[in-house]
Image (cartoon, grey):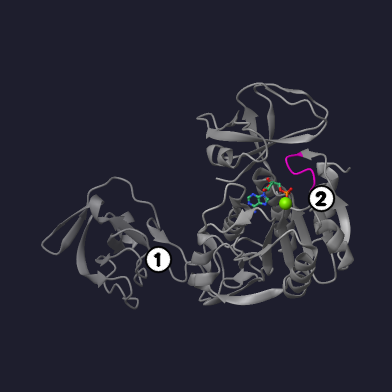
Amino acid sequence: MITVKEASEIVLNNIQDFGTEEVSLEHSVNRILKENLTADRDFPPFNRVSMDGIAIQFESYQNGHGIFEIEGLQAAGSPQKTLKNKANCLEAMTGAVLPKNTDTVIRYEDTEIENGQAKITIEEIRFKQNAHQKVTDRKAGDILVKSGNIISPAEIGVAATIGKTHLKVAKLPKVVIISTGDELVEVSEKPLPHQIRKSNVHNLWATFLRWGIQAEKRHLNDEKEEIRKGLKECLKNFDVIVMSGGVSKGKFDFIPEILEELGVQKLFHRVRQRPGKPFWFGRSDEATVFAFPGNPASTFMCANRYFRPWLRASLGLDSFEYQYAVLEEDFEFKPDLTYFLQVKISYQKDGQISAKPIAGRGSGDLANLADADGFMELPRGQNLFKKGDAHPVIIYR
Ligand code: AMP
Ligand code: MG
């Protein structure tokens, strides 16, 4: 059986490239940018007034001038005006072009205006103050955002200001989520005493939605012919198949055998971890298959620990940086497995993230997932994990 480290290396060695597409600015948030965004003009494009006040020529102030006759007003959105008499001033608004023959702006707060004259009421004035100089931020042609970045609201603002109505982004994979099991019924149904409602498929769907993927949902009963037919169709029509259930040692766990029969190469089956030990991973020419065990905590943990880094790498993002948190209490775990402990996260005033163990009652304890905020990855080969020790965490909340 392979380790978590080996399993994640195999997963990351089998990424896929889904190409690129153009999407409108409105649809590009959270996508991965696949072009450089360059400045179409200088930033700022003109000497910009950055405070409401009066624009003067610094030299006349230096020559002892303290009172300036107001010649007129330079508003934002108006073409540049010219100060005619160097001893005068123009009122100038934030966002306006700095008027010709002026270089310095004094805030209204630092003036007294009476009878068409502005008197400066402060001692010190600096040359070019409150005038945001053209080109000081970036010059035309500069790269403002590099290809490969996640498009956050900050990048949306940059794209908008350089006139991009559409952006080239990484294409997302077509994903299908398949639940398996004869005991499962729909959310809308009332289960018989021996049945349960499907939950994993919805948990996974919501998980993927957060990563920008609208997956399709399917269900297959524990019946060989049905599985064969269903998987065949999905291999043809999707880039990624994410399954839950049917990969353990039960008499009706047919998934691994049928996947191999359909030409999906097994890259590993079973990982030294809890939850999620029976995880099966493989790929064919057509698709990549993540077959997670059916227990809700297993499915959810595996999606976060394996699928997400795979997706990020496939889309061309840098490797995933795990956050670390500090255990709030001692925790004991004896088996020789990497343990993904469910934890409640809190953010401390000193900047530390702390994690309180909420172990729950095993990988089938679905309700516990709603009490916790994430999984803390505790390494193999250690039984006692001490309060104050830092370990990686995957936070899903
Ligand atoms: P399996 O991996 O198929 O042996 O399933 C392990 C456990 O997870 C069983 O108790 C299943 O009933 C349960 N299970 C499997 N699939 C789902 C699902 N989609 N939603 C909720 N529970 C599931
Ligand atoms: Mg099953």
Residue 259, image quadrant: bottom right
Element type at mark 2: loop
Q: Is residue 292 left or right of residue 395?
A: right
Amino acid of disc 1: Arg
Residue 245, x across and y down, in percent: 72, 52
Residue that mark 2 sits on: 251
Q: Is residue 269 above or below residue 54?
A: above
Residue type, mark 2 in image: Lys
Residue at the image point whose x is 60% and y is 25% from the top? 328
Q: Position of residue 136 (x, y in %)?
A: 52, 62
Kind of element beneath mark 1: strand
Residue at image position (57%, 56%) is 206
* Crowd rating for badge 1 (residues with CA inside 10 Å; few <14, some 14–19, many 20+): many
Q: Earlier in the sequence, mark 1 or mark 2?
A: 1
Q: Is residue 125 left or right of residue 380?
A: left
Marks counted in the figure total 2
Residue 117 seen in render: yes
Q: Say above or below: 355 vs 20.
A: above
Q: CA distance from mark 1 to mark 2?
A: 74 Å
Q: Which residue is mark 1?
A: 48
**Can residue 137 be seen at all in this image of the molecule?**
no
Residue 93 falls left or right of residue 188: left
Q: Residue furthest left?
A: 115
* Magenta part of the chain: 274-278
Image quarter of the C terminus: top right
Are the residues flagged by discs 1 and 2 in contact, CB closer than 8 Å? no
Give the residue drawn at x 85%, y 67%: 284
